[in-house]
């Protein structure tokens, strides 16, 4: 583990209560260094992640699912780009979950997620996820209260199934403040290099901030389990966000105690001429 980071403090304890208002989106108090030191640690974590991902792919025993959820501008794309930039793309895949297609709507709400889960030896990152069914659909009244409440149980059953099939599940809520979202949205409007990211619908969603915070709080509290924990990551500052997510992922992979497959006995006497 890297010095100065105590990632346990960011977890949503299974069976416990969560108050998002008590989780500071700009918090850096869990880290004993500054931004420059964090960047040095991130480079070390990058090297460890590269080796671990290669072992995961080579050993071909485990699967890893990483779930990223956030409000608009929360940094899902930036987190993926920063943490997995140097990893071999042959064993890593990003699955995006946007507005459901008609085919997806014709199936149960977990159908499209199950089709994207990692294969053996693979890391899959869900950029948004099956949790949209208890977030967006709840906030916009697309499903009834009875439906979204029972989905908590269905999600936990789904994730338990994956866990029992040797899938390591890590779920991150990138927690930004409403003030930081305002700054980032304005930056998108003002910066010609970022204007393509701006979506007018983001402003309508921003008006529903209290409803989303309530939905997130209940979803995280109801679905954080020992085998599929939620982490609330302070995301107002990109450097601490990326450092914490990297540390948690690397720590989880190291706990798998992976090894490279040994050379087949019939090849040990092989000499290349």
Image (cartoon, grey):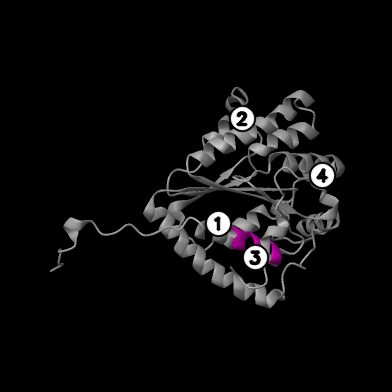
Q: Mark 3 points at which residue?
A: 243
In this picture, is 63 found above or below 191? Answer: above
Q: Residue 72 location, x and y as percent?
A: 75, 49
Residue at point 64% right, 34% down? 155
Residue at image point 41% right, 54% down: 57
In this view of the protein, which residue sits in the foreground, 84 or 231? 231
Q: Earlier in the sequence, mark 2 or mark 4?
A: 2
Mark closer to the chain start, 1 or 3: 3
Q: Nearer the viewer, mark 1 or mark 2?
A: 1
Q: Distance between the residues labelled 3 and 4?
A: 24 Å
Q: Which residue is drawn at 76% across and 27% down?
A: 142
* CA–CA distance in space, label 2 to label 3: 35 Å
Q: Name the residue under label 1.
A: 252
Q: Residue 101 — which label?
A: 2
N-term mark: 1 or 2: 2
Span colored in magenta: 240-248
* Residue located 39% across and 59% down the image: 259
- Rendered-image quadrant of the C terminus: bottom left
State if disc 4 and disc 1 touch (CB < 8 Å).
Answer: no
Instruction: Report the side of 33 relative to 141 (left or right).
Output: left
Residue denoted by label 4: 213
Q: Is mark 1 on a helix, strand or loop?
A: helix
Task: Give percent across and percent down for residue 70.
Answer: 72, 49
Numbered disc 4: secondary structure: helix
Residue 207 seen in the current view = no
Percent x, y of residue 55: 41, 58
**Residue 102, above or below 35:** above
């Amino acid at each position: 583990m890297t010095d100065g980071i105590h990632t346990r403090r960011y977890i949503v304890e299974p069976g416990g209560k969560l108050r998002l208002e008590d989780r500071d989106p700009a918090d850096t108090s869990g880290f004993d260094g500054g931004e420059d030191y964090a960047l040095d640690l991130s480079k070390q974590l990058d090297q460890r992640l590269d080796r671990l991902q290669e072992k995961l792919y080579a050993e071909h025993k485990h699967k890893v699912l990483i779930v990223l959820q956030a409000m608009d501008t929360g940094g899902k794309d930036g987190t993926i780009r920063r943490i997995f930039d140097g990893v071999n793309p042959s064993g890593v895949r990003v699955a995006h979950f946007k507005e459901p297609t008609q085919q997806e709507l014709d199936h149960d709400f977990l159908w499209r997620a199950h089709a994207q889960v990692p294969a053996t030896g693979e890391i899959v990152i869900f950029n948004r996820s099956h949790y949209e069914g208890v977030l967006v659909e709840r906030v916009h009244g697309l499903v009834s209260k009875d439906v979204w409440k029972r989905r908590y149980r269905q999600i936990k059953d789904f994730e338990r199934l994956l866990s029992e099939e040797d899938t390591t599940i890590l779920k991150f809520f990138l927690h930004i403040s409403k003030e930081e979202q305002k700054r980032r949205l304005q930056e998108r409007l003002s910066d010609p290099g970022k204007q393509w990211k701006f979506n007018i619908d983001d402003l309508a969603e921003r008006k529903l901030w209290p409803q989303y915070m309530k939905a997130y709080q209940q979803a995280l509290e109801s679905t954080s389990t020992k085998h599929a924990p939620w982490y609330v990551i302070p995301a107002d500052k990109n450097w601490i966000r990326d450092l914490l997510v990297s540390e948690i992922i690397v720590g989880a992979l190291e706990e798998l105690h992976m090894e490279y497959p040994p050379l087949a006995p019939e090849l040990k006497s092989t000499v290349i001429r």
